[in-house]
Structure formats: C-alpha cells, structure tokens
Amino acid sequence: MTKVAYIRVSTTGQNLEAQREAVLKAGATKVYQDKASGKDLTNRPQLKACLDFLREGDELIVARLDRFARSTGDLFAMLQELASKKVAVTFLDNPSMSLSTAHGELIISILGAVAGFERRLILARTSEGREVAKRKGVKFGRKPVISAEVKAAVAEKKAEGELSMGAIAKSLGISRATAYRALES
C-alpha cells in the first residue's frame, strides 16, 4: 500500500509548504503538487498523474478538501473513480469524508445526489436564460462567415463580366471557395 498525497495552490504566489508538511506528517511517501486554479480539472496535470498512479489498496491523502475539487460534481466523480479502484481517500481537514468508512460512503452518496441536483439546476437556469435571450432577438451559434457585403461584391463583380472566380476572390481579399459560396447563397 502506497500513501500518495495531492496538494495544490491556486497561484504561484501561494505556498505549498503547510500542505506538504501536513501530508508528510500523515505518512505520505509520494506527493503530487499543482500550482493552478481548481476550477478547471484539465489544467491540473499533477492531479491527473496522481489519479493515474493510484492502485487498489493505495491511500490518497489530501490536506484540504477545497484543494482537491471546486465543485460537488467534480468531487463526486473523482471519489467515485477512486472508490471503483478501491483506493482509500483521507481529507486531513475533514476526516468524516474518508472513503474507508461507512460514514464516508454515506456522505459521498449524499454528495452524488447534491451534484445531480446542482447539475439539473444549472441546466434549467441556462435554458431559461437562452429562451429569454432568444425572445430579445439574440442570435445563437456561429456568425455567418460570408457577410452580405461580400456576397453583394462577388455578385457585382460577376455581373460586370469578371469570369474568373480566382480574380474576383483576389480582388476582394477572400478565398476562391468563399467567392463560390457567396455566389451560391
């Protein structure tokens, strides 16, 4: 069994030493550390490396819960992954969250329900906001690639007798494919 720790600070100006001391005192033999915001899991390469390293029977030690996950959904997903690998998790600032106890498993189950609820609320608010914006005339999606001005200029040059789409495109500073699409639309 390996005791592995994960520590993180949000900015380079912050110091990892207090967390490092705490996890080493708790018995960690390997420490992964990130200096990155916690809001984006993809921007935390050492967390990914840590989660990939852990094997059945290992223990993950985290000094503070808020250094591990910023949202209930992320926390629940990571804890579920660790539980499926049979990795024990200990949060030094919140021992009741340990995956090795019945109380910890209950808390994780409750967190899962809260995460699902939180996700549904976010989706509902997003949908409502989108509907309000649509009623106000906001257009969603990608902006038209070919403006009305470009379409008109291509049509005008073609009507003036310019035969080569390459020449039309060059004179307007667009690609030949864009010139053809402008004529088609």
Image (tube, rainbow, N blue to C red):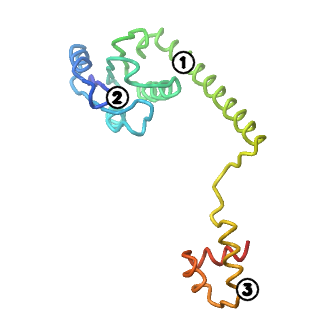
The residue tagged 2 is: 10
What residue is shown at x 59% (from left), y 19% (from top)? 114
Residue 151 percent coordinates (x, y): 69, 72
Which residue does the image show at 24% across and 27% down from the upper left?
31
**Disc 2: CA contacts within 10 A as few (<14), some (14-19) or many (>=20):** some
Residue with the mark numbered 3:
159
**Can you identify the residue that label 1 sits on?**
111
Q: What type is the residue that disc 1 sits on? A: Leu
In the rendered image, which quarter contains the C terminus?
bottom right
Q: Earlier in the sequence, mark 3 or mark 1?
A: 1
Judge left or right: residue 4 versus residue 71: left
Q: Image check: 54 left or right of 178?
A: left
The foreground one among 81 and 20 is 20
Q: Amino acid at mark 2?
A: Ser
The quarter holding residue 25 reads top left
Per the image, label 2 sits on a secondary structure element best described as loop
Q: Which residue occupies 66% across, 91% down?
A: 163
- Which is closer to the viewer, label 2 or label 3? 3
On the rendered structure, is 173 left or right of 37?
A: right
Q: Residues within 10 Å of mark 3 (few under 14, many from 20)?
A: few
